[in-house]
Image (cartoon, rainbow, N blue to C red):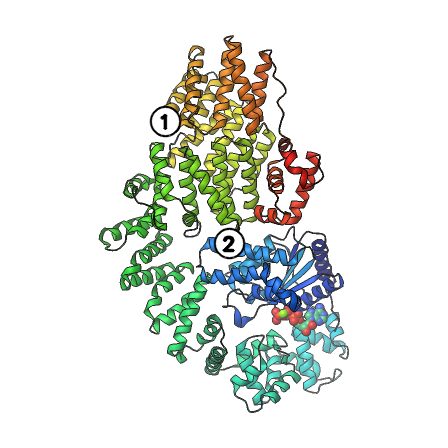
Amino acid sequence: MSLLERDEAVRRLKAAMDSAAEGTGRFVVVEGPPGIGKTRLLGCARDLAEADGFDRLTATADDAEREIPWGIVRQLVERSVARVGAGERQAALAGPAGAALTAIEQAEAGGHDEGERMRTLHALWWAIADLVGDRPTLITIDDLQWADAPSLEFVGYLARRLSDLRIALVVGSRPARVEDGALAELTSGRLGDLLRPAPLSVAAVGELAPEHPPGAVAALHEASGGNPFLTQQLLAELAARGLAGDDPRTPEVISTLGPRSVSHALLARLTPQAHSVAAAAAVLGVRCDPMQAARLAEVDDPAAAVAELARAHVLVGTEFTHPVIREAVLTELLPTDRAELHARAAADLRRTGASAPRVAAHLVESPHRLDADGVRVLAEAGRTLLADGMGETAGRYLRLAFDAGIPEVRGELGEALLIAGRFAEARAELIAAAEADPTRAGTLLAQAATATMRLDGHQAAIAWLRATLETFPGDPLPMEARLGLFSAYVPDEFERSGRRLRRFAELPGTTTIERFLLALLAQRAYAEVWPAEKVRALVPRALGPDVMRLDGHEGAVTWGSALHALIMADGVAVAAREIDRARAAVLPDGSPMDYAIVGAVGTVLAWRVGDVRGCETEAAAGLTALDAADPGPLASALRSVLTRFAVLAAVERGDVPGARAYLRSHDDALTGPATVPANRVGHARAYLALAEDDAVTALEEALALGAAEAAAGADNPAVPWRAQAALAHLRQGDTRAARALAAEQHQRAMRWGAATDIGAALRVLAMVGGEHDRIDLLRQAHDILDESPCVLERVMVERDLGEALRVVGRRSDAREYLVSAAERATEIGAGRLRAAAVDALDRLGDRPRKLAMAGADALTASERRIAALAGAGRSNREIAQEIFVTPKTVENHLGRIYQKLGISSRRDLGAALHA
Ligand SMILES: Nc1ncnc2c1ncn2[C@@H]1O[C@H](COP(=O)(O)OP(=O)(O)OP(=O)(O)O)[C@@H](O)[C@H]1O
Ligand SMILES: [Mg+2]
């Protein structure tokens, strides 16, 4: 039958595919009520794709399988493997497809940790990108309203990351209810083109019923509401009743046939045998094995019944001719019969070795028939689903298993309820489970505290933890870790929590939870300005990527802040080793979020050692990774950290417009309330303002930052707002204010004791002080900076010292410092300082031999990173994987890089970069 009134929809599908063929992937949602023609349009897209030489991948969700994790993803991956010949299959499974399937399996075993899930999603994304390769590909997914939750999450992940893949992703879905969060988001049209097939016009209905006169057509249109499926059903019903098109009774009969009654009339004509096979098939799903259905129905002549269902257009092959017919069968079925069929289905599936979730989906529909074996299957399925983050269903299965006499699942039941967001029930179960199992009690009660926090807020959870810990006989550390973590959100608790955490300062750091506590303490130690020496002694015991991966992103944040404290305490060698270790750990299963976390810490480290060029390169790479990560509070915080240091580095490189651009895109992306990292971007704003001689803005920003730090209970001189404010006052001629703040900064720096901050503070004191002290103070700064890892601060002092010596006429001393400053500035990519030093040398009338700028300075930060990776021998694919773009993007970048460096291949990169 021809396709009516869908020209516009087909045009839009075609446009999406053309775009994909040209390299820009597109997402299209076809949404509408049952029978309106979604599946038909998806078929249309597949025909277009075939004509255009596209590869095609397809999957269909099934109402009966929505509790089976990763169903849709499995279909896509397995079918893509099946496409290749038997010989190639092994190779395909050794490659991305195999990796994707493994990622799914591991996710099942790996716990429902949020970070873990992001890694799985990203691994799957890569698998798809790889499977598709350079061939334009159409992926169709139908009946998305029935997709299992993890698959749905992946479809969302993919839909957001199509832009440089040659993929047209077209999904069909019935309208989502608001409470179907993920589905509602996908079908909202925000992520791509939304097609809503309209009901057919009277004229089109007329074409479907060419034998019928206008009166009958009008009645058909009225009764079907223009729904093509209903129109067909009505016509079939009229034919079955032997009513010819021109029969005068036809319009009258049509008006008595509602949407329900047509399908029911169709079923009513089946023999009892066929009817019961249809019922069994409906229980099995939209797709089913008809012979299995016949087995469940226990009919005498299965073959005859199945043949009859095919003749009656109820089944075609191994599926219902239309989902609506299955739904009609189900609504007719008595609840008791239905439960009976589910029980038989469960038994049958178990006999054939189906997975626990598959069997459990039927067991729960016949709870009164559960035997001991079935209860065990439910418990196993519940655990699997819990690991896949399907908390709601896992909770249902585990509740049944627990009630039916498996007490040891109670803790997991509590955990499932926790991720399902049912906090009150979760808390009750977790507490009860803790009473029953003293060995796990500490961990279970810590989770109960999380439930309390979600129910009643941080303060209440803190109070509950304190009270519970008073009398708790078991291992207190899991609860202490929660307490420390929650306290980090409540400024009023900082002091008390700091005191409490101090008790753990001597922990050896042998377990994850010990390391987590030590990391929390390090965060406080930095804020409270302990001696840097103590921080350097403490943090190494807190390190280890396991903390980073603890508990979703909480571990990552804590790991990052401990490392931040260590870096600011000048413990850079240990930090560098830890960052390398973490990077090696996150790269292979590369989730962009993990990458950005490590990148953010790497950026801080690069700045602290004064590697301006490396700092900006690293920051830009982190920001690119964040564009591929899902938005949220952690992404916001990381964006702020990366932006702050990218701006500082850009300013030092002498690229003010670049610095401004970083700030602009940061402010555009920023959502949610002000956080500590977001406030600290003020450091960069003040830095930029000082570089531009805008003392008013600099002062404003610096003082606002000071206030924000105080409000967050932090006052570490490594956030040098006092020094910045002092310099701003100086430029405005307020020397007294400048000196007071510079002296305070110096005091703080002395208390902290990190050479970098002391040297920097001395330099500012020298600048705001009188001329006769200046050289002396700068010399002190120079001496102490010998102990600091920060090349940049040393160069600044050398430049200032050279300039001060020039002013008093000590030309040869001046020249020595200025030449050294210019050379070192070139090494670290500090163009601004280099220019200032060269300028001073000019004024000295002693222009040095021309200092060559490195060839790499012609490149942007991300180009430099790609050039470095390519120069080190990585393939485009490897680079793409490392920086979260597609190989195509890498190719484009390399083209520009060659052009800028005046070379023609990657073989010349090494030489050009080190020119
Ligand atoms: N524009 C059209 N012109 C002619 N026939 C159509 C048109 N659209 C759909 N049909 C026919 O109507 C029937 C129902 O369409 P389809 O199966 O695509 O609906 P659907 O929207 O996928 O429904 P469901 O939500 O139940 O899956 C099919 O037989 C299909 O061929
Ligand atoms: Mg359909």
Asked whether residue 172 appears in the rendered view, the answer is: no
Name the mark on residue 118: 2
Q: Quadrant of the C terminus?
A: top right
Residue 119 in picture, x, y percent from top left: 51, 54
Residue type of the residue flagged with mark 1: Arg
**Where's ligand 1: which quadrant?**
bottom right
- Residue at the spot x=63%, y=87% of the render? 308
Residue 309 falls left or right of residue 17: left
For the residues labelled 2 and 1, the Cα–Cα distance comes to 41 Å
- Indicate yes or no: mark 2 CB to ligand 2 under 8 Å: no
At numbered mark 2, what does the secondary structure look like: helix, strand or loop? helix
Mark 1 surroundings: few (<14), some (14-19) or many (≥20) residues within 10 A: many
Where, by quadrant of the figure, is residue 910 drawn?
Answer: top right
Q: Tell me which numbered mark, 2 or 1, is placed earlier along the sequence.
A: 2
Asked whether residue 702 appears in the rendered view, the answer is: yes
Residue 428 falls left or right of residue 905: left
- Indicate yes or no: mark 1 CB to ligand 1 under 8 Å: no
Residue 801 in picture, x, y percent from top left: 49, 16
Residue type of the residue flagged with mark 2: Met
Q: Is residue 483 above or below residue 770?
A: below
Residue 32 falls left or right of residue 687: right
Q: Is residue 169 above or below residue 214?
A: above
Residue at label 1? Answer: 748
Where, by quadrant of the figure, is residue 652 drawn?
Answer: top right
- Residue at the spot x=24%, y=54% of the render? 472
Where, by quadrant of the figure, is residue 302 drawn?
Answer: bottom right
